[in-house]
Image: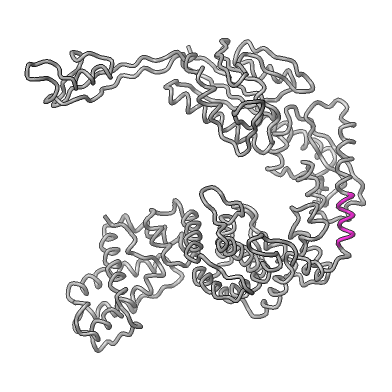
Amino acid sequence: MMANYLLEIGLEEMPAHLVSAAARQLATRVSDFLIDNRVTFETVTEFSTPRRLAVLVSGLANESESIDEEVKGPSAKIAKDSEGNWSKAIQGFSRGQGVTPDDLVLKGDYYYANKHTSGFKTADILIKIGADVISKMNFSTYMKWANNNFLFIRPIQWLVSLLDSQIVAFTLLDVTANAMTRGHRFLADTPIVLEQATDYENALKNAFVVADSAVRKALIVAQIVEIADDNDWTIYLVPNLLEEVNNLVEYPTAFIGNFDAKYLAVPEEVLVTSMREHQRYFEVRDLTGKLQPHFISVRNGNAEFIENVARGNEKVLVARLEDAEFFWREDQKLKISDLVEKLKKVTFHEKIGSVYEHMRRVKMIAEKIRQQAHLPEEYAEKLDRAADIYKFDLLTGMVGEFDELQGVMGEKYALLAGEDAAVATSIREHYLPTSADGALPETAIGSVLAIADKLESILSFFTVGLIPSGSNDPYALRRATAGILRIIDKQKWTIQLAELIAELYELPLNGFKYAKYDEVMTFINGRVAKMLEGTARHDIVEAVLATSSLNVAKLTAIANYIDVKSTESTFKNSVENLARVFNLADKLENEPSIDETKFENESEKALFAASQTLNMTADINQNITQLFSLSKPISDFFDKTMVMVEDETLKNNRLSLLTNITEKASEIADFRLINTK
């Protein structure tokens, strides 16, 4: 008969953004624990609220599976001594396997032990779950409490460990697991004794706790949708906000709050940020999408005295809106030029200098990027102006209070000050993307400024030795690098990033000199390789990365197609012939110069003619196919031609012919790095 097992960890309230991940981790660890201990089960259902993590394991076997295994032992040659007695080797092996030498079976030249390991009662295995599962959980945030060294996401208040109706007691710190859980902190905070593991969800429901996070979220959505329908409103249920609100409550009740319509004169982004980011409210819009002076919040409790709760939330929000209105009014009295001047005294980093100095370097880098991206000269003036001022809003009152709005307020204040719209937009866009898969800049000027700002940060931090290591990346340089690559890819710019960065090391930087070029390029190549993971074999990715184009879309397409070609029978010869060309071409010490009159055999002429057809177009598949089609003429050339002859003129002519091929092939890959073994 199959059993059910409930494990619950009762805690002080956890940070909302960590609850879901913690619940998934617990479910995974419990599953792995049972599998490792050979206990079969059907399903693991996870539960979570702000103050509890739990799993219900269904279809659990009553004992672990037994094991019958055949263990190889010593050879027959050393199994017995000269008198026919069992040797020490065979006796030691037998003891280790829990059998006698006479129990061993001779198969071929070796003795084997047939070993049977009986299963253990599931209850006896589950006693270890505190030490083997709970104490080994990992979190991004830990707490230590009382006089112990144990770390956990929040202090543990109670533990439930129930196998059907049997308590499987274990102790973690000074808390011993039993069958007693707790309801809602305010509505039913009395002990609840569970008779069966399967009683868990209903017992908590009766105590004003909706333990299933998916069910709780569905309730929140249904309540908000009903409010919206009743009032002809549009409510955008932002996924991240909905998840966070769901993890803030155990028993949800949605309600309406209001604020004075006069605050709608403040920029919408400020109001929305105040509601979403600071108060965890959902903003209200009419059916046309226009913001309304209302909000929807979710209470952790029932509807009793909900009017008082709404008034309390309104007071908190109005206090923030009063601040926002004040800063909006006062910031418009400031001059951009004055704020930029004050940036000279704002530290970018103590080892690097001021924000103003960072902006001066970004300005020079931005112009280099504009040129490499082949953007028209008419962009230069706007780009210069944007680079001159783009951080000014850091010193405004609004950004000081709402730092999430840096860039956003810069755009608005720049427009109010009469700045060009493209300049203002780039001030907002230079922060993009703000996450690994976040939105990218739309405009060319904003894209250039975003790349320049991120690239200058990378070069500066590397120069002073602040280089990411392991998982440590306090200045988000990995994200900045990924952002640069994604922006270049989106804009379809043919920027040679390696060449660009090399040029930046020669810039006059008013006393600041970039250093550690090799480390920077290794770091950037590593990020590209990370983005290419899974697109092709590792050696193919490495070969493609050697082209130094660092155009992620192009590199991905090349790696994909070479990976496809690697399954063809001709792949090995094609790659090895190209690799041989690369190796010899490296020996040319002069500028390549081909003289057709100096060809001495037909194989030279044929290879030259074939190489002339190479045309590295935008069609990557065609380029690779053309390169691989050179395999036979290359092979014939090497069969009939000695390249490294004593005659310098002939040698250089032949090396030049090979270099002509590698110059084009290098746009695809360094074929020497592809493994053909």
- The residue at the point 71 percent across, 34 percent down is 246
Left or right, 552 with reference to 295:
left
Tell me residue 187's x, y (percent): 79, 21
Tell me residue 665's x, y (percent): 37, 70
Quarter containing the C terminus: bottom left
Residue 161, image quadrant: top right
Circle count: 0
Residue range in magenta is: 322-331
Left or right, 203 with reference to 503:
right
Residue 651, relative to residue 276: is it above or below? below
Judged from this view, the residue extending furthest toward the bottom is 597
Give whichever of 57, 580 is nearer the camera.
Answer: 580
Tell me residue 173's x, y (percent): 60, 21
Residue 480, image quadrant: bottom right
Give whichever of 372, 454 is nearer the camera.
Answer: 454
Tell me residue 586's x, y (percent): 32, 73
- The residue at the point 75 percent across, 27 percent down is 251
Residue 403, relative to residue 358: is it above or below? above
Residue 193, relative to residue 377: is it above or below? above
Q: How is the image coloured?
A: one colour
Residue 491, image quadrant: bottom right
Left or right, 82 with reference to 25:
left
Judged from this view, the residue extending furthest toward the left is 82
Give whichever of 50, 130 is nearer the camera.
Answer: 130
Left or right, 399 with reference to 78:
right
Membership of 147 in magenta stretch: no
- The residue at the point 39 percent across, 18 percent down is 65
- The residue at the point 44 percent across, 14 percent down is 63
**Overall secondary structure of the magenta section:** helix
